[in-house]
Image (tube, rainbow, N blue to C red):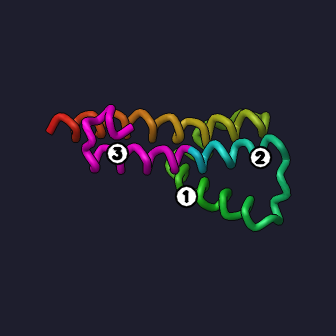
Amino acid sequence: MARRYGGNPAAVIILIAADIASLILILWILFFLLDANRGNELVMDVHHAADWLAGWSRDLFTVHNDDWRTILNYGLPAAVYLLIAHAVAGRVNRA
């Protein structure tokens, strides 16, 4: 990844932060879809972090199917974070 952005450490940090945020959101989607034990500490921590990361998009989509609602409301911010991070990292690299 560092080679792609010319080794610019700021660009790499931006991409890593977006990757981690997206990973947390995707992990919560998987936990939800696979009906993970919500009493488990790891599942609870991931859920809290995903709620915080997706705070701006929660309940943006109000479909009646819980699976699709979770996929849309947590998947959208994951995609947005990645798209924005790649755009910002590209600009940082050009600066």
Residue 88, horizontal then vertical, whole percent: 29, 39
Gap between marks 3 and 2 measured at Cα: 30 Å
Q: Earlier in the sequence, mark 1 or mark 3?
A: 3
At 27% from the left and 49% from the top, the residue drawn is 10
Position in image of residue 41 (x %, y %): 75, 67
Image: 72 above or below 52: above
| Residue 57 drawn at (x, y percent) | 54, 44
Mark 3: amino acid: Val
Question: Residue 6 vs residue 32: left or right?
Answer: left
Look at mark 1 in the image and give the residue it sits on.
52
- The segment highlighted magenta reads 1-22
Q: Which residue is mark 3?
A: 12
CB contact under 8 Å: marks 3 and 2: no
Relative horizontal placement of residue 87, taking residue 80 as reference (left or right): left
Residue 92 lies in quadrant:
top left
Residue count near mark 2 (Cα–Cα under 10 Å), binned few <14, some 14–19, many ≥20:
some
Asked whether the residues under the numbered discs 1 and 2 touch, taking CB atoms below 8 Å apart as contact, a structural biologist would say no
For the residue pair 94 and 73, the one nearer the viewer reads as 94
Which amino acid, by three-letter code, is at mark 1? Answer: Trp
Task: Tell me the mark number nearer the camera, choosing from 3 and 2.
Answer: 3
Judge by depth and name the residue closer to the eye, 9 or 27: 9
CA–CA distance between discs 1 and 3? 23 Å
Quadrant including the N terminus = top left
Dot placed on the residue nearer the N-terminal end, 1 or 2: 2
